[in-house]
Image: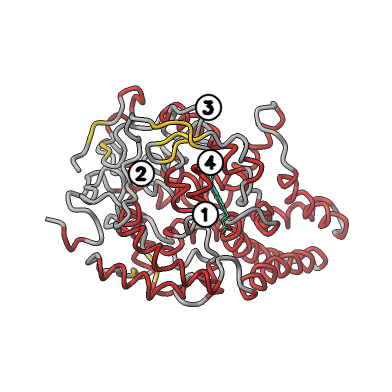
Amino acid sequence: MAPREGDSRNGVYSSIKLTAFTKLPTNYPHKSFEQWLRGKRTDDGVAPYWRVHNKLYDLTDFVDRHPGGKMWLQVTKGTDITEAFEASHFGEGPEKLLQKYYVKDITTPRNSPYTFHKNGFYKTFKRRVEPILRKTGKGPSWKSLVIQDGLALSFLLLTFASTVLSSYTLAVLAGMFLSFTISCAHNYFHQRDNWRMYYFDLSGFSSHEWRVTHALSHHLYTNTANDIEISALDPVWVFLPKPDKNLIQRYGSYIYDLPMAPVIAFVAHLTRIFEVCIGITPLRPEYLLPYSVLFLMATISPSFWQAFKLFMTIHATTNCVFVAIGMTAAHHHPDIFHDGDRMRDDPDWGLCQLDAVRDRVEVTGNLLLVLTSFGEHTLHHLLPTVDHSKLSSLYPAFLETCKEFDIPFTFMKWSTLAVGKYMQMARITTNNNYPGFKKKAS
Ligand code: HEM
């Protein structure tokens, strides 16, 4: 697919050449989940309905009864939820249920370029994994639960010990365990509502927000202009290959990653608290979770100031570890598709996911490493609502589908991805071959 001009209403961003979307999304670059949702509502233009493929549905009466939780449908009202619907469910049940809410057909083309043809890569793969998941179940195994709760408990015990002993070494360890806890909790916020997803909020990040920015934006439109994780830190981190990036944007992150990483969740949290105070965001109880830990620390510490310093040490550590792992886990390298690069001719959603994700060989196959460092990432992207503990059993079906579609699936070394993040930031030219799985590219 040939690159198309960005939308001029986005001013300086009009130099971005897009290949996945026909124009820059409204409100690009996205800085908050509400801003992204507002832009998507404007661009998709299907209020007061929900769009799935070329049909409109009125799900108003279903929102509160949705087995995955009402939030998913509440926030997406007025938008095209095709990718979310296709990627979140298995079997014919949800499809049949959807027909109950049919309103009318819509002829305007979708903004999203992706397809879900019956005999395409993605649907074929899903048909293969369905019988396996029927046997094993999609939800967490006991090992997954023990790891999640064990990590959270370790974080709390280390926090307690660091406070009692006034130990910064233990605070750093507690921070590392908090980072592992929230990486693991990310597995849980992708699934139906469950209390373990709130472990994520212990960090100051919000599981509610990340269900939009990560599950509905990043996961469904990976590495495109509609992926908030691509633009949230623009103009500091500019991941798309933009021709007019300046030298600081291309090479500065070698230096400014260091001061940025420790404060990233603080900034997100304080912004949210400010929005709550001025009344533009409702206060959700889970926003208070980090304060409950600080309160407990203060009650057992000789002074509040001492507890506060240890608390900040814990969170600065968590942020550094989380950023270091998250940024190098799967998506950024010049060989990986970023909007503007040539897209493959078959825009099957699953195939395009393969182009925008890479797995690290070092963390594959070990559940503890997988849960704490975003492992089995390709399978997780293809099946985001399936617990990570079930993913390794799906490799045979996945590899068989890759073989059938002539897709050579490969892993990358973590070190290659770590360097790749900086190479991607420096990149200003687009790839003319669709990246990574180049077998059929000219
Ligand atoms: C934004 C769109 C949607 C998202 C993100 C979403 C997400 C989810 C999630 C996370 C689950 C739990 C999956 C699991 O635990 O296995 C779920 C289950 C379910 N959803 Fe949705 N959903 C969406 C739209 C819909 C729609 C439009 C329908 C039908 C009208 C629907 C019907 C169902 C059903 C029947 C289940 C239970 C499936 C099962 O237990 O196997 N969903 N959904």
Q: Nearer the viewer, mark 1 or mark 3?
A: 1
- Marks 4 and 1 sit apart, C-alpha to C-alpha, by 12 Å
Q: Which of marks 3 and 4 is in front?
A: 4
Disc 4 crowd rating (10 Å Cα; few below 14, some 14-19, many 20+) is few
Q: Name the image colouring.
A: secondary structure
- Residue beneath disc 2: 224
Where residue 101 sits in the image (x, y, percent)? Answer: 53, 38
Q: Which amino acid does label 3 sit on?
A: Pro
Mark 1 lies within 8 Å of ligand 1 (Cβ measured) = yes
- Which mark, by number, is residue 100? 4
Mark 4 lies within 8 Å of ligand 1 (Cβ measured) = yes
Q: In the figure, residue 398 lies in which quadrant?
A: bottom left
Which badge, 1 or 3, comes first in the chain's sequence? Answer: 3
Q: In the figure, residue 34 lies in which quadrant?
A: top right
- Which mark, by number, is residue 48? 3
Q: Which amino acid does label 4 sit on?
A: Lys
Where residue 87 sits in the image (x, y, percent)? Answer: 45, 53
Question: From the viewer's perspective, is 114 left or right of 194?
Answer: left
Where residue 4 sits in the image (x, y, percent)? Answer: 23, 34
- Marks 2 and 1 sit apart, C-alpha to C-alpha, by 31 Å
- Marks 1 and 3 sit apart, C-alpha to C-alpha, by 24 Å
Where is the N terminus found, in terms of image quarters?
Answer: top left
Label pair 2/3, CB-CB below 8 angstroms: no
Where is the C terminus found, in terms of image quarters?
Answer: bottom left
- Which mark, by number, is residue 63? none
Disc 1 crowd rating (10 Å Cα; few below 14, some 14-19, many 20+) is few
Q: What residue type is labelled 1?
A: Gly
Label pair 4/1, CB-CB below 8 angstroms: no
Q: Nearer the viewer, mark 2 or mark 3?
A: 3
Residue drawn at x 66%, y 69% as measured from the top left = 151
- Residue beneath disc 1: 93
